[in-house]
Image (tube, helix red, strand yellow):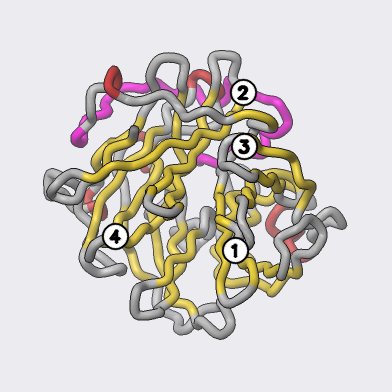
Amino acid sequence: MRSRLRKFLLAGATGLLAVTAGAYGLMRADAATYPNPGVVTGSTFAHDPTIVKKPAGGYLLAYTAPGIGLKTSADRTKFTDAGKAFPGGTPWADAYTGGDTNLWAPDISYRDGKYLMYYSASTFGSSKSAIFLASSTTGAAGTWTNQGKVVESTATSGFNAIDPNLTVTPNGEWWLSFGSFWSGIKMVKLSPSTGKRADSAIHHIAERFVNSKSIEAPHIYYRNGYYYLFVAFDFCCKGASSTYRTMVGRSTSITGPYKDRAGTLMTAGGGTEILASHDAVYGPGHPAVFRDGTQDVLVYHYYTAAGDARLGINLLSWSSSGWPTVY
C-alpha cells in the first residue's frame, strides 16, 4: 500500500485504504492546541499545494491535478483558478502515468528571473516514477516548458521518485529532496545552471518503519543555521478518514543527519509532530514553507468532514531553541 491515492482523490473517490489512526507518539503535541487553518476564500480546493511569491506582487500556487493546476492570489487569502501549467498534455510523462494526465506534487520557486517547477509522474502503488523540471518566464497557464527528467526510480530501486522539493543553500548549492514510502526520503545534488543532477550520489535523510513505512512529501527550509525537514507521516487521500500529519526534524547540514526535538534520528523513524487532525480538520499534510516578508508561512492540504480537499495556510512561530509551532 502506498500514498499514491491522489489520482483517486481527484476523481472524487474517498474511503480507500482502511487504516486506523493509532500510535502517534514521537513528541506528539496535544491536538486540542492546534490552530484551525487561516482564512482562505475563493477557489479553495488544493492537493499537495506549493506557493511562491511573485516578484511583481501576489502569489502563484500549483497543485496536483491533470496538467498541474494553477491558482493566483493578490493577498494570500482569496485564490482564483488560473488554468493548467500544461493544458496541451504531457506525453513525455505517459511512460510513468500509463497515460493518466494527473501529475503529482509540484514544487514551485522563482530563480534567476524565471519560475521553476519540479513535479512527479507515477501510478498508484508503483515505484516506477520520475521527477521532471519545467520552467516559465511568467508562470501563467500554457507557458511552461518541460526541461526534461531529473531523477527516476524503477520497480527495483527501493525508493520512489515523487514529491520533489528544491532547496538552495545560503552558499548557493542546489539540492532536491524527494521520496514516498519504500526506503524513505532521499536527496540529490543539482547543478544550478541546469537544474538537473550534478552527480550520481543519492543521500538518505529520513525513513520510517511502522504504518507501512508511511513517510513522504519532504520540504526543507533553512533558518538561522538549521535546515528543517518537514514531512508527512501516515496516510492521505481518505477524506475525513485521512491520518496524514505534519512532522519536522532539523540538521546543521542539508544532507543530515536530521533529528527530531527528542534527538531521534529521522533515518530511525524520528519526527516531531506539529500539526495533525483536530476539530473539523482531517489529515493536514504535504507541507511547504516559504518566507513572506517577516512571516514564515506553512502551506498544506487537509480534508473537511465531507471529505473535500482544501488549501490550508498558517504561520509558524519559533521557540527560543529554534523549534517551530503552527499558529
For the residue pair 81 and 162, the one nearer the viewer reads as 81
Main secondary structure found in the magenta portion? loop
Q: Is residue 100 visible?
A: no
Q: Is residue 15 magenta?
A: yes
Of circles 1 and 2, which is in front? 1
The segment highlighted magenta reads 3-27
Residue bearing mark 1: 55
Q: Amino acid at mark 2?
A: Asp
Where residue 38 appears, as percent x and y from the top left, is 47, 29
Q: Residue at x 26, y 26 (%)?
A: 23
Structural distance between the alpha carbons of marks 1 and 2: 32 Å
Q: Mark 3 packing: few (<14 Cα in 10 Å), some, or many (20+)? A: many
Q: Secondary structure at mark 3?
A: loop
Residue bearing mark 4: 223
Structural distance between the alpha carbons of marks 4 and 3: 27 Å
Q: Is residue 215 visible?
A: yes
The C terminus is located in which quarter? top left
Residue bearing mark 3: 46
Q: Which of disc 4 and disc 1 is earlier in sequence? A: 1
Where residue 80 appears, as percent x and y from the top left, is 72, 39
Q: Which of disc 3 and disc 4 is earlier in sequence? A: 3
Q: Is residue 78 left or right of residue 191?
A: right
Q: Which of disc 2 and disc 4 is earlier in sequence? A: 4
Structural distance between the alpha carbons of marks 1 and 4: 21 Å
Structural distance between the alpha carbons of marks 4 and 2: 33 Å
Count the numbered circles shown.
4
